[in-house]
Amino acid sequence: MTAQFDRIALIGIGLIGSSIAHDIKRLGLAKEVVIATRSADTLKRAEELQLGDRYKTSSAEAVKDADLVVVSVPVGASESVAKEIASSLKPGAIVTDVGSTKASVIAQMQPHMPPHVHFIPGHPLAGTEKSGPDAGFPGLFEGRWCIFTPISGTDETALKRLRQFWEALGSKVDEMDPEHHDKVLAIVSHLPHIIAYNIVGTADDLEAVTESEVIKYSASGFRDFTRLAASDPTMWRDVCLHNKDAILEMLARFSEDLAYLQRAIRWGEGDKIFDLFTRTRAIRRSIIKAGQDVDAPDFGRPHPLEKKA
Ligand code: NAP
């Protein structure tokens, strides 16, 4: 593949930043990649992993002469990064981010963006519960959606170039307004994480069941929540604080629906329970049909006898 950009600057080199770096290298999407992260330790690790060509602890220095700047830091750090890079951005540069919330990131970054750059907020819907530069891997974005929430009046050529970049990484690109993005993500991603953090916290607090029992019998269902609940605390604290309204709205809906289920269980209303569980089972089938998961039992985890077969 020919290089799409002469110089790409990656600000933040955790799971998402390093996965992008792997793909840029694998696919030859840039002539040069400059990496910046705030801590010397993370930067050293990025260098050991050979994720880029040059390494900086100053984001302002890293973005100099970059045609594309990708900001991959916790959403609460967006404003400080925008302030730091603003005066060093090259005229005509595309500046994008990967933050899990969009209205807040726009509010934090846009006021600092000079008029001569194209700021296009984005969010790849791909990830794992791991963090840091070692967590990234090539192909993370393959077959996954990347949502842009462009500001009105955004240059079409810049949008097309960024779309081509994400498509080269294997993503399918969609556009929506930031408030809508935040509502959709509140239900498909933020609420499930909050519920998982909460269930795992509740189990941890239970006095009648010992910690060793929770762990010993975890494969009964609990284990699947622990993957989400092991996600990065800084990232998810920021998501909660920066998508507050949409999350609170979804939590209110969730609490009402939980009360309905609770009541059905209390009064032995088996039909209501059965109908709900039948409806939800169909959702899982739709996800598999849409290619967003594999049609293997237990999320494709290998089982002892299957391995032998
Ligand atoms: P990560 O693995 O924890 O990496 C975070 C990076 O940001 C590191 O380079 C870290 O630098 C830097 N950073 C942390 N706090 C900072 C601060 N206050 N100021 C400046 N830099 C800071 O995180 P990630 O999973 O890649 O997530 C990055 C962004 O992607 C987040 O906005 C998240 O919402 C979004 N996202 C995540 C996922 C996911 O599944 N993880 C999926 C889609 C989008 P040091 O190590 O040098 O401190």
Image: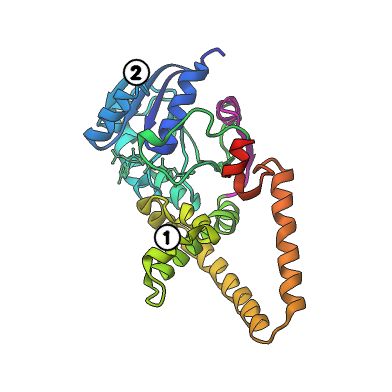
Foreground residue, 167 or 91? 167
Name the quarter showing ligand 1: top left
* Residue type, mark 1 in image: Ile
Which quadrant holds residue 11? top left
Q: Amino acid at mark 2?
A: Asp
Mark 2 or mark 1: whose residue is earlier in sequence: 2
Q: Residue at x 41, y 31 (%)?
A: 18
Which residue is denoted by mark 1 in the rendering?
Answer: 215
Considering every residue shown, the one lying at the far left of the view is 40
Q: How far is mark 2 from mark 1, CA to CA? A: 44 Å
The image quarter containing residue 125 is top right
Snapshot colouring? rainbow
Query: In the image as oriented, which residue stretches furthest toward the bottom?
Result: 267
Q: Nearer the viewer, residue 109 or 37?
A: 37
Residue 167 on the magenta segment: yes
Q: Is residue 187 magenta?
A: no
| Residue displayed at 46% across by 19% down | 25
In the image, what residue occupies the spot 44% across and 37% down?
Answer: 16
Q: Which residue is mark 2?
A: 53
State the quadrant of the C terminus: top right
Left or right: 273 in relation to 107: right
Q: Position of residue 296 (x, y in %)?
A: 67, 44
Q: In the rendering, at what x and y percent does residue 130 appear? A: 41, 43
Q: Is 51 above or below relative to 272?
A: above
Callout 2: helix, strand or loop?
loop
Q: For this view, does 48 lie left or right of residue 119?
A: left
**Residue 93 appears in the figure:** no
Is residue 87 visible to us here? yes
Residue 37, percent across and down? 30, 34
Question: From which residue to which does the magenta span run?
Answer: 159-177
Crowd band around label 1 with a 10 angstrom C-alpha radius: few (<14), some (14–19), many (20+): few
Between residues 267 and 240, which one lies in front from this camera angle? 267
